[in-house]
Image: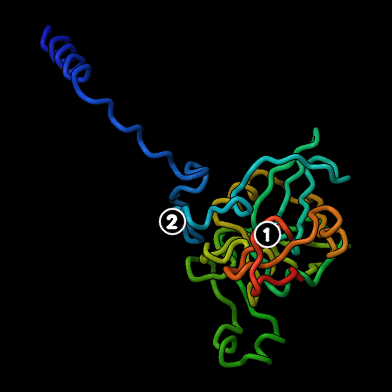
Amino acid sequence: MRLAPLLLAMGLGLAACAPTPEPPAAPPPDHGVYGARTDTGPNGEPIEIHAVRTAYLTERNRRQRVPYNGPEAAGTIVVDPYARFLYHVLGNGEAMRYGVAVGQAGKNFQGTASVGRKHAWPSWTPTANMVRTQPELYGPLKGGLRGGVDNPLGSRALYLYKGGRDTMYRIHGTMDPSSIGKATSAGCIRLFNQDIMDLFHDIPNGTTVKVRTQTESRALEGPLVELPNGYLAPAGGEVQTAEAQPAQ
């Protein structure tokens, strides 16, 4: 059919006479990684994972391949609860870095452990201490909360073991992406759901996990300050305000 070439020629001719259009706006950083996903829930039901808002994909929060000079072997997961980073060591002087949120429990373990088990859409049970100290909040959940969109562990969880025993330390997702990069009141180490889903797929049970001390973090990441918006920044690397505090 000769109609299609004719229309194409007419379109090209019109385009040549028209002003050059503005180029399309650049997509948000890592839009493909942090776009919406449909996942399978604990009962086989579809669960929609919403795209991460661009505002949350700060330089420190966004997944990225970075130089890595630590001593850990390729395949190791390194958690830095003070710099609020998680590294998946790739070898050859590189690692994949993820931004994390850190709850109080995220600073309760230091040293080396391993991933003892992994769960998709994990259930969650508050500790006896949580129920005892905050019965109004946690009492109704003492029997446990099934996995799903209302569960604070999000879409995936990695459970750390040491010497065959559960350390109670978790690396998990979140249903609150605005928390990533910040300190939180509860929980261990949380990532964007998209990040924990891909990490869950990439690492096997038995993977070594190194959790840095504050001293190790400061030596490798340098001093940090917490900004009024709750994010961290290198000390001296940002315009400081009276509210900025040294990171703990």
Placement of the N terminus among the 4 image quadrants: top left
On the image, the x and y values in percent for residue 189 come to: 68, 64
Q: Nearer the viewer, mark 2 or mark 1?
A: 1
Residue lying furthest top = 2
- Mark 2 secondary-structure assignment: loop
In this view, 137 is above or below 49 = below
Picture residue at 85% right of the left edge, 42% below the top: 73
Q: Count neighbours of disc 2 (C-alpha within 10 A) and say few if under 14, some if 14 to 19, many if 20 or more.
A: some
Query: Which label sits on residue 1?
Result: none
On the image, the x and y values in percent for residue 212 come to: 83, 60
Picture residue at 43% right of the left edge, 57% below the top: 47
In this view, 147 is above or below 130 = above
Query: Which label sits on residue 233?
Result: 1
- Mark 1 secondary-structure assignment: strand
Q: Amino acid type of disc 1?
A: Ala
Left or right side of 25 for 163? right
Q: Count neighbours of disc 1 (C-alpha within 10 A) and say few if under 14, some if 14 to 19, many if 20 or more.
A: many
| Residue, disc 2 | 50
Chain-order first, disc 2 or disc 1? 2
Q: How is the image coloured?
A: rainbow
Left or right side of 169 for 1? left
Q: Quadrant of residue 210?
A: bottom right
Name the residue nearer the viewer: 12 or 150. 12
Callout count: 2
Placement of the C terminus among the 4 image quadrants: bottom right
Left or right side of 201 for 39? left
Q: Amino acid type of disc 2?
A: His
Q: Quadrant of residue 145?
A: bottom right
On the image, the x and y values in percent for residue 184 come to: 63, 73
